[in-house]
Image (cartoon, coloured by chain):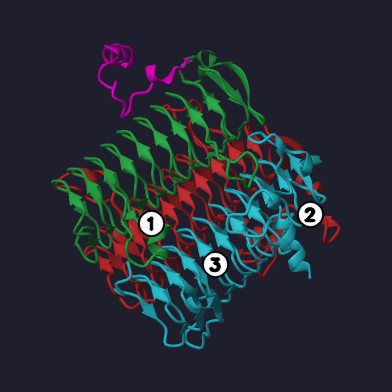
Chain colours: A red, B cyan, C green
Amino acid sequence: MFTGTGAIISPSAILGKNVRIGDRTIIYDSVEIGDNTIICNDCIIGEPLNAYYKETGNYNNPRTVIGADSLIRSHTIIYAGNIIGDHFQTGHRVTLRENTILGSHCSLGTLDDIQGHSRFGNYCRLHSNVHIGMHSELGNFVFVYPYVVFTNDPTPPSENLIGPSVDDYTQIATGSILLPGVKIGKHCVIGAHSLVSKDIDDYMLAVGTPAKSIKNVRDIIDRSTGKPHYPWPYHFDRGMPWNETGFEEWKNMSEK
Amino acid sequence: MFTGTGAIISPSAILGKNVRIGDRTIIYDSVEIGDNTIICNDCIIGEPLNAYYKETGNYNNPRTVIGADSLIRSHTIIYAGNIIGDHFQTGHRVTLRENTILGSHCSLGTLDDIQGHSRFGNYCRLHSNVHIGMHSELGNFVFVYPYVVFTNDPTPPSENLIGPSVDDYTQIATGSILLPGVKIGKHCVIGAHSLVSKDIDDYMLAVGTPAKSIKNVRDIIDRSTGKPHYPWPYHFDRGMPWNETGFEEWKNMSEK
Amino acid sequence: MFTGTGAIISPSAILGKNVRIGDRTIIYDSVEIGDNTIICNDCIIGEPLNAYYKETGNYNNPRTVIGADSLIRSHTIIYAGNIIGDHFQTGHRVTLRENTILGSHCSLGTLDDIQGHSRFGNYCRLHSNVHIGMHSELGNFVFVYPYVVFTNDPTPPSENLIGPSVDDYTQIATGSILLPGVKIGKHCVIGAHSLVSKDIDDYMLAVGTPAKSIKNVRDIIDRSTGKPHYPWPYHFDRGMPWNETGFEEWKNMSEK
């Protein structure tokens, strides 16, 4: 509902055209929101950093940018200092800590917990309840499924944090854990419930604890068609930029 | 608290006798709530589907039914299109997406995330933080423990979703993952931290990654009594319909 | 924001000096809050027990204590009957059920779900999304990482609950599950994605499903320094009481 009841919008916030702000949603200082974006009820955008609660006066909230044509569902908390592209979507109760850069067309699922200081490419899709530790790197078209964790501390507790990185088109299935600093190539599939402790080459299916590369993803058969399913962009296009042209032609066009 | 502050109730909602609605709770169009049901603060009941945020005008919210004598704790979000039986209970911050049918006496724990398009029998109990993917089927008296995931996509991402099914009385212990389409029989126990990749026969204890059936549940000894504990309805009756008569007599009566 | 809008504070609550209460936060009966504590927006402190929703009249809310100099972030729910020390911190959306005792300087991460009837020493740090079952015991300086679960029912469902216990300085890494009643010694490290089914001796690194003790933690090398990292208090002091004197001297002083 967008009755305006209880919403608080900082005078220093910059709202685009047709922006709708839900009831009781709070927009803190130095937030910029693109045209046509909808922010539902009970959200916090530009949540101040720790210093705000400790210092008396003199706190300056870092700049926060949310792109155009976005839909942010209820109870989502986005800290100050994030720069988010257009066509952003969230489920409910997402928590996005400070200083992360997200490309365009990214979506974060219900209860996702992004710890900040990370970087996402375009068209990343995180399902519900994904935990991304600080200093993670996701390429483009990376999809991550529930209860996956990107960890970053090889010897907890320490100050030597090093996040995992995941390259374009890779799928990380439910309940897998990526150990600190692992690098996963492009077009990989990490099977459900795996513990990834070493780097994984491009186009590999890796499964188990610790995860081992067991086959090329091109050899995975879709049981419903009897044909190969990967690389998946040839067989899945919902919401993808190639959904009118097909992946091959889109790729050729975008490489020009 | 039920001060009425900020609650919004659609004129098309139908509330039974003695229904209590918490502060700031929103009841959207076409919601029906049974007698004596309590909905705590900050809940959303009948959350509109995606089309509501995209379309201009002409959106009709699907019918949502919540049974009598239910208790829905704070910050719970129930989408439109769910049909829920009597004596329903939730913890806090539950998310229940559209088009799921729940029998009577079901309970969903804090932070459960039910993705919709699923079917639950009677007396199902989900502990905290359970994730049920779309197209799942739960029988009666199915208990599920924290961080269990029911998955549904054999080759992610794809459009060929097929959910797991779990038969009556089965227990799915903490942190287990059910792969797409697996069928688990009745009176089974799935051990903690298992990955269920194949069907499991009735009365089996299955554990591991991948889960293997290692013994009949009748051979599991309760260390506190030195006697068998399963089938559990003979030894546990809190909140169960046989808690005055015993399971054997209740079963005989209900089969008549 | 602390505009006072919609906050409800029971007349029987006792607030220390300089306490700040966020918008729409509810402080129920018999809550005591120490000096300088900040409670952000949309929190519930002293959430009543089940009986409150069932009984008519005659419900007395148990005493709830939150120490001084604490910071409780938005949407946190703390049930009645908890006794919490000074310098307590939470992330967002924490749920803390009834009758847990926490020492001083503890912190609970975003989405943590503490089921109640447990006991924490001082300086415990739970990262996001930790689930602590009832009847758990944590010593001092115990750190727990995301999606760890402390379980308590050996034969679910049953009434014979027995929680795990974890001794001082031990680290439980991401995604590990502790089975009911296990006892983990002091200065241990439990590797990510482990299933702890047996007791673990002091100073052990244990990993796997089921978790096995594979080496003394003193033999773990920090790859960034090439030197041993454990016992970690010699190499990590952020927020710790020895952060000015070093662990050795602090320990000697505190043993006097």
Q: From the viewer's perspective, is A176 left or right of A217?
A: left
Q: Are marks 3 and 2 in contact (CB under 8 Å)?
A: no
Q: From the viewer's perspective, is B110 left or right of B132?
A: left
In the rendered structure, find residue A221 and report the number of the disc placed on it: none
Identify the image quadrant of residue B248: bottom right
In this view of the protein, can residue A256 be seen by the observer? no
Q: From the viewer's perspective, is A152 left or right of C122?
A: right
Residue A184 position within the rendered picture, expressed as x and y whole percent measured from the top left? 62, 39
Depth order, front residue of B11/B72: B72
The kind of residue on which mark 3 rests is: Phe
Residue under the image location 51 percent in, 84 percent down: B30
User: Looking at the picture, does residue A206 appear above or below residue A39?
Assistant: above
Residue under the image location 40 percent in, 67 percent down: B40
User: Looking at the picture, does residue B42 appear above or below residue C69?
Assistant: below
Q: Are marks 1 and 2 in contact (CB under 8 Å)?
A: no
The kind of residue on which mark 2 rests is: Gly
Magenta segment includes B218: no
Residue B197 position within the rendered picture, expressed as x and y whole percent measured from the top left? 77, 47
Residue at the farthest right position? A226
Secondary structure state at the residue bearing disc 3? loop
Depth order, front residue of A238/B87: B87
In this view of the protein, can residue C183 be seen by the observer? yes
Residue indicated by mark 1: A77
Quadrant that contains the N terminus of chain C: bottom left
The kind of residue on which mark 1 rests is: Ile
Q: From the viewer's perspective, is C181 left or right of C71?
A: right
Depth order, front residue of C156/A108: C156
Residue indicated by mark 2: B185
Residue indicated by mark 3: B88
Residue under the image location 72 percent in, 41 percent down: A204
